[in-house]
Amino acid sequence: MSEVIISPSILSSDFANLGRDIRLIENCGADWVHIDVMDGHFVPNITIGVPVVKSIRRVTKLPFDVHLMIENPKKYIKSFAEAGADIITFHFEAVERREVIEIADYIKSFGIKAGLSIKPKTPPEEIIEYVGYFDLILVMTVEPGFGGQEFMPECAQKIPLIKRFADEKLIIQVDGGINAQTARVCTRLGANSLVAGSYIYNAENIEDAIKSLR
Ligand code: DX5
Ligand code: ZN
C-alpha cells in the first residue's frame, strides 16, 4: 500500500450506478472505499445502511472504511462488520466517555480496525487518552453531514497533537473538503489517510485526481 491511504467517499458517487462507481475508483488507484453512514439524528442527513454495504461487498476487494455518523453506534457494529466492513469509525460525540474503550475493543473483536472520529468543535485534548486503543483517528475537517463543503483549516491544526500521542502504526485520517491543496496541508501536519468525495467523483480524470492527492 502507498504511504498515504486514499479513501474516496462514495457519498459523491451516482447511487443509481454504485457498483460501477466503486469499480471506477478501484481501477483508478483508490486504496479504500469510504462509506458514510448517516442516521438523520447524529447528523441531519440519511445515507447508506447495512444492506447496501452487504451488496457492494461483492463488487470490490478494496477495504471498506465505514464512517458511522450515527447515534448509538455500538448497536450497529456487528451488522456492519458482518456486512463486510474492514474499518469501523464512530464518533466520540455519539457515545459516553466510559464506553469509548469498550466500543474500540468490540470493533476489534470482529478482526477489523477501530477508528474514532471528532467533529470540528471537539478539541483534540478530549481524545488523547483514547488514542492508543484505536487503529485510526479521523479528524473531521467539515461539519459531518454532507459532501461538497469547504475545508476548515483550523481543524487540521489538531493533527500534530494527536500525532504526538500516536505510535507509528496509527492512521490519522482527514475527511471533508479535501482536494490537492488541502490534502497537502493535512499530510504536512501528519495525516496519512485522506477521504475525498466531491474532489474525486467530480473530477474529469479520476486517476489524476487520486494521484494529485498523494
Ligand atoms: C461528510 C462525510 C464525508 C464527505 C466528504 O460528513 O463524512 O466523507 O463525503 O465529502 P467531500 O470530500 O466532498 O467534502
Ligand atoms: Zn466520511
Image (cartoon, rainbow, N blue to C red):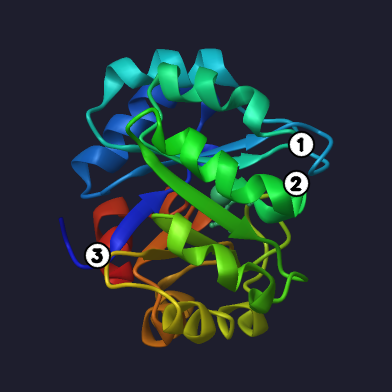
Would residue 138 be seen by someone viewing this image from the given angle? Answer: yes
The image quarter in which residue 177 lies: bottom right
In the picture provided, is 152 more to the left or to the right than 83?
right
Give the quarter of the figure containing the C terminus.
Answer: bottom left
What amino acid type is highlighted by mark number 1? Glu
Residue 12 versus residue 175 in the image, above or below:
above
Q: Are marks 2 and 1 in contact (CB under 8 Å)?
A: yes
The quadrant in which residue 191 appears is bottom left
Q: Is residue 46 left or right of residue 213?
A: right
Residue at coordinates 75% horizontally, 46% vertically from top-left? Answer: 94
Q: Where residue 117 appears, x then y in whole percent? A: 59, 57
Q: Earlier in the sequence, mark 2 or mark 1?
A: 1
Q: Residue at x 80, y 42 (%)?
A: 42
Residue sitting at x 57%, y 40%: 103
- Residue 94, labelled with which disc? 2
The nearer-to-camera label among 3 and 1 is 1
Quadrant of residue 186 within the rendered picture: bottom left
Cα separation, mark 2 vs mark 1, equals 5 Å
Residue depth check, mark 3 versus mark 2: number of the one nearer the observer: 2
Three-letter code for the amino acid on which mark 2 is drawn: Ala
Q: CA distance from mark 3 to mark 1?
A: 35 Å
Q: Residue at x 57, y 49 (%)?
A: 101
Q: Earlier in the sequence, mark 3 or mark 2?
A: 2
In the image shown, does 165 or 144 lie closer to the viewer?
165
Neighbor class of circle 3 (other Cα within 10 Å; few <14, some 14-19, many 20+) is few
Q: Is residue 166 above or below residue 204?
A: below
User: Which of the two labelled residues, at mark 3 and mark 1, occupies the earlier sequence position?
Assistant: 1
Disc 1 target residue: 71
**Which residue, given by chain and number where applicable, does mark 3 sit on?**
211
Residue type at tag 3 = Lys
Q: Secondary structure at mark 3?
A: helix
Say if 130 sits above or below 107 in the image.
below
